[in-house]
Image (spheres, rainbow, N blue to C red):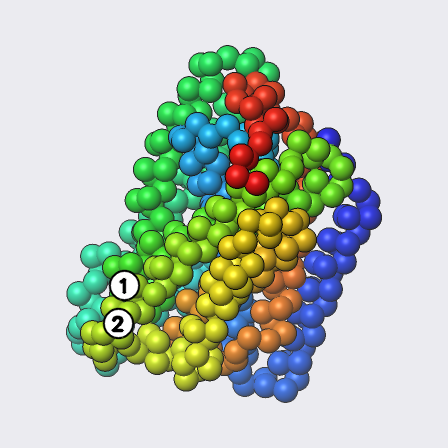
């Protein structure tokens, strides 16, 4: 059983406070130096919170998806990690509520809008800002329908997260096959819901920021990133708890299989990255390749640099079987992957924002510390004094004594 110590709480509090001080410093500096650009730096702060909130929410979604894959496949090796997967996914209600709240503020015009298509003049033929291309997309890109879709995402994912915890807890207490079968059925339903909704989420939260560009592979690209993020966080927390001495069942056999999933999900993300880039490079259509040209000019080809932490490092370090069972190597690779996918999230959003006055800097770092600290506190606080042994699962003993014959 893990105890969330006062020392660990103080460390997380320090991270949040330091991030808050950095953010205040950024605000006061802008107020003193660029008083006329108040709107621009407000936009920077808002988009920083939006991007970071989306990133940590994607980690929780990825964890829940991975948990459901284990339920559906009836895997025995991973049962001991179910509590960790459930607690990482427990950030979903907070993350979705945060994003929904920010979208509502955007829609009402209370904060600087990051969604260019929300400008009503773009749909008015009498306006000088009228854009016939965006006007054609009004059936999908309109504020009421946008709010309704996001409300469905928030309620849907939060409901499933609550449902899995409920049935998992019942299974652990009552130890009945009925609850086990219920988890299987609910996991199948959720995966179907996820496969459909994740595409719409990627369109709404990210791709609609630039209404002039679209990709038929984008939903799968974002999906693979969520899954990789989730597996990376599961690995980090498992190793952290193992080092704390409260996750004794977790051994090199579990780590090896978890590393294989981390390795394969990184390759999956890389595959979608390559497919998307290759199609646009080969087609060479101006309105499509502008997506990559803009990122090359603004951020020095960041679209290619993110391949190093997200593909090259995991590929080279996790290919070897011995490395897959080395806690230090796997922990470092997981951290690198999470950093790389934050850079990927940044790359998908920032270059398409209108009126963005700055690149990555103090504002983004401070917000990352604040939201990251809140995420860690929520996660560790939920794990605190939680029973990390799902003894009610019929495969628990198999998972407890699991041995991989190939290592």
Residue at (40% x, 61% y) in the render: 270
Residue 346 visible in the picture: no
Tell me the quadrant of the picture where the C terminus can be found.
Answer: top right
Q: Residues within 10 Å of mark 1 (few under 14, many from 20)?
A: few
Q: Residues within 10 Å of mark 2 (few under 14, many from 20)?
A: some
Q: Quadrant of residue 20?
A: bottom right
Nearer to us in this view, 8 or 233: 233
Marking on residue 215:
1
Up-down relation of residue 373 to residue 87 (above or below) = below
Count all numbered tags in the image, as a single digit: 2
Determine the CA span between mark 2 and mark 1: 9 Å
Q: Secondary structure at mark 1?
A: loop
Question: x%, y% of residue 29?
Answer: 66, 80
Marking on residue 304:
none
Q: Are marks 2 and 1 in contact (CB under 8 Å)?
A: yes
Q: Secondary structure at mark 2?
A: helix
Question: x%, y% of residue 250?
Answer: 64, 35
Up-down relation of residue 333 to residue 286 (above or below) = above
Residue that numbered label 2 is attached to: 280
Residue 399 visible in the picture: yes
Q: Quadrant of residue 400?
A: top right
**Direction from residue 61 to residue 117 in the image, left or right:** left
- Residue at the limit of the structure toward the right, as seen here: 7
Residue at (44% x, 14% y) in the render: 178
Nearer to us in this view, 223 or 397: 397
Up-down relation of residue 159 to residue 318 (above or below) = above
Question: x%, y% of residue 160?
Answer: 44, 34
Up-down relation of residue 211 to residue 247 (above or below) = below
Residue at (80% x, 42% y) in the render: 5
Question: x%, y% of residue 326?
Answer: 64, 49
Residue at (59% x, 21% y) in the render: 397
């Amino acid at each position: 059983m893990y105890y969330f110590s006062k020392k660990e709480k103080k460390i997380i509090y320090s991270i949040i406070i330091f991030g808050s001080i950095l953010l205040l410093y950024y605000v006061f500096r802008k107020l003193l130096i660029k008083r006329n650009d108040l709107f621009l730096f407000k936009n920077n702060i808002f988009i920083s919170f939006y991007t970071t909130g989306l990133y940590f929410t994607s980690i929780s979604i990825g964890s829940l998806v991975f948990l459901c894959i284990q339920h559906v496949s009836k895997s025995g090796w991973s049962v001991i990690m179910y509590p960790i997967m459930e607690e990482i996914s427990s950030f979903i209600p907070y993350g979705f509520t945060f994003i929904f709240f920010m979208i509502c503020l955007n829609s009402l015009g209370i904060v600087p809008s990051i969604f260019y298509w929300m400008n009503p003049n773009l749909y008015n033929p009498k306006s000088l800002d009228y854009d016939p291309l965006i006007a054609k997309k009004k059936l999908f890109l309109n504020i009421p329908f946008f709010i309704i879709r996001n409300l469905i995402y928030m309620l849907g994912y939060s409901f499933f997260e609550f449902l899995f915890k409920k049935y998992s807890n019942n299974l652990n207490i009552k130890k009945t096959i009925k609850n086990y079968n219920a988890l299987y059925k609910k996991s199948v339903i959720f995966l179907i819901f996820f496969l459909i909704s994740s595409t719409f989420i990627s369109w709404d939260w990210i791709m609609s920021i630039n209404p002039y560009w679209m990709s038929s592979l984008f939903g799968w690209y974002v999906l693979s990133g969520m899954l990789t993020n989730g597996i990376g966080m599961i690995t980090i927390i498992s190793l952290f708890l193992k080092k704390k001495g409260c996750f004794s069942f977790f051994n090199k056999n579990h780590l090896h299989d978890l590393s294989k999933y981390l390795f394969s999900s990184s390759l999956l993300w890389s595959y979608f990255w390559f497919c998307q880039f290759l199609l646009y490079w080969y087609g060479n259509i101006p309105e499509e390749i502008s997506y990559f040209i803009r990122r090359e000019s603004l951020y020095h080809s960041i679209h290619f640099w993110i391949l190093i932490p997200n593909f090259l490092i995991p590929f080279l370090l996790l290919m070897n079987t011995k490395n897959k069972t080395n806690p230090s190597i796997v922990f470092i690779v997981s951290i690198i992957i999470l950093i790389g996918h934050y850079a990927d999230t940044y790359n998908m959003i920032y270059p398409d924002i209108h009126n963005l006055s700055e690149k990555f800097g103090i504002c983004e770092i401070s917000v990352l510390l604040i939201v990251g600290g809140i995420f860690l506190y929520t996660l560790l606080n939920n794990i605190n004094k939680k029973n990390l042994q799902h003894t009610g699962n019929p495969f628990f003993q198999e998972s407890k004594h699991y041995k991989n014959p190939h290592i």
